Amino acid sequence: MSKNKLIDPCIGLCKFDPVTGYCYGCACTLQDRNKWTNGTSDTWKSKNLHDIKRRLSNSWPLNSWLSNYKYKQEKGESLFEIGEKILDIPDDEFLKSDSK
């Protein structure tokens, strides 16, 4: 595989942060993920990869963790637990509803 090929940024850790909407593995949003799946221009892919690197360098995982941890301290359960109860929808169902 070419070193410079623009490939899907997914690294297989597909869990979305309930505060930011970013995937913990690759920092994509559900909309980003859907666009990569449906195919887009190399210009969009390059910009999205740049955005992902910026998101990761801005320490959003730490900020997200801090806000999630504080919520858990205050409420007794994590936002993930609440989100899973509320949403309880497989990832492929998110993609279907997101593309409408």
Image (cartoon, rainbow, N blue to C red):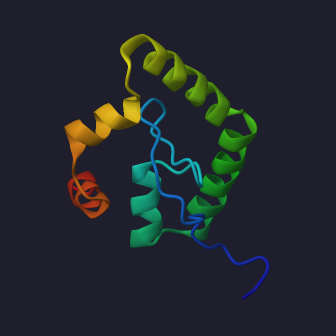
Q: Nearer the viewer, residue 85 or 58?
A: 85
Is 74 left or right of 93, judged from the image as shown?
right
Q: Quadrant of the C terminus?
A: bottom left
| Image-quadrant location for residue 83 | top left
Q: Is residue 36 or residue 72 the one in the foreground?
A: 72
Q: Is residue 88 left or right of residue 77?
A: left
Query: Residue lying farthest bottom?
Result: 1
Compared to residue 59, the image places residue 16 above or below, namely below
Seen from the viewer's position, the closer of residues 6 and 56 is 56
Q: Residue furthest front?
A: 76
- The residue at the far right in this view is 3
User: With respect to residue 62, does 44 lie above or below?
Assistant: below
Residue 49 x, y percent position in the rendering:
66, 56
Quadrant position of residue 44: bottom right
Give the number of marks: 0
Apparent side of residue 38 relative to residue 87 in the rendered image (left or right): right
Q: Residue 85, position in %: x, y?
A: 23, 39
* x 64%, y 49%: residue: 52
Location of residue 74 with respect to 12 vertically, above or below: above
Q: Position of residue 91 (x, y in %)?
A: 31, 59
Q: Please report the residue visible at 48 percent of the width from the left and 68 percent of the height from the top.
A: 40
Q: Position of residue 8 (x, y in %)?
A: 57, 69
Residue 11: quadrant of the picture:
bottom right
Q: Residue at x 60, y 69 (%)?
A: 42
User: Quarter of the image containing the N terminus?
Assistant: bottom right
42 versus 27 height, above or below: below
